Amino acid sequence: MPPTAASSALARACHPGPTVAVTLLATLLATSAGAGPALVAAVAATVLTGQLVIGWSNDLVDRDRDVSSGRTDKPLVRGELSAGLLRRAVTAAAVATVLLSWLLGWVAGGLHLLLVVGSGVAYNLGMKATAASWLPYALAFGTLPQVAWWAGGSGPVGWAETGGPSAAPWWATLAGALLGVGAHLLNALPDLAEDERQGVRGLPHRLGAARVRRLAPLLLLAGVVLAVLGPAPGWPVGPPGLLTLALAAVLAVLAWTLPGRAPFLASMGMAIVAAAALVVS
């Protein structure tokens, strides 16, 4: 296989949407926490390689299920990518993730390896089909602010600009967890019927589409409220905060009331608002 074709197939097999979104979120969180350029780059590279491990291992684990489902959007199913090459890519990404996590210090690096990457791999290996399918998302997204805040604690890349690392506030962790669970529900929603046919019965499948459509916007709205009110609890809230709350509330109402695909799109909009609120706060 030509190198360009292999690279293209690997890029499409890594679940590029979530991979880029999570990496961007972690990068912006590190920036908002006061990290300098070198540390922000280290956080971005570390989280990117970790997401590659999660995305590529997902396609390896789900290969047989994807074949039986006719998932022709998957390079591994289409034969554009061999299982051997994908296994080597996962191994290389895993090694890079461990080495890069070391740059962030033992606290941030350990949190990233155990609770971000570890949660994603555990989801791929079977938790997706259990009632606790929400837990890996809650742990991973809730841990991202902690990784950003603690980065550089004892590693080669330090916090000269900020005087040292510290733990992220509790509300940032909880808001991240709410965003993660909401994202999990939204991500599963389009494939509920096919997943059930394949024997995958995670929390969204047990709740059913109607309940998922109600619960996901509620969780995302709660995440926005925490991100806006957490830094300075109480009133009055400044104009940017009020605008963010109003936008999230409008999107939640749309997600609860509109027919067809509109609720899914409105909920996705809320996820973006929740992520932005978490970064800005």
Image (spheres, grey):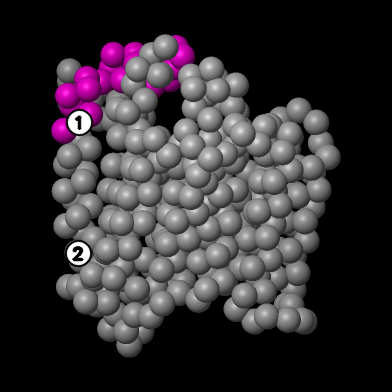
Spot the residue most to the front. 131
Q: Which residue in the structure is indicated by mark 2?
A: 102
> Quadrant of the rendered structure where residue 227 is?
bottom right
The circle drawn on residue 170 is none
Residue drawn at point x = 60 percent, y = 32 percent = 205
> Quadrant of the rendered structure where residue 16 is?
top left
Spot the residue most to the bottom. 163
**Callout 2: SS:** helix
Circles 1, 2 touching at the beta carbon (< 8 Å): no
Name the image quarter holding the N terminus. Answer: top left
**Callout 1: SS:** helix
Which numbered disc flags the more N-terminal residue, 1 or 2?
1
* Residue 252 x %, y %: 75, 49
* Residue 150 x %, y %: 34, 73
Residue drawn at point x = 56 percent, y = 71 percent = 171
Specify the amino acid type for callout 2.
Answer: Trp
Would residue 219 be seen by someone viewing this image from the given angle?
Answer: yes
Instruction: Answer few, some or many: residues within 10 Å of disc 2's Cα (few below 14, many 20 plus, some between 14 and 19).
Output: many
Question: CA–CA distance between discs 1 and 2?
Answer: 23 Å
* Residue 229 x %, y %: 67, 74
Q: Which residue in the structure is indicated by mark 1?
A: 87
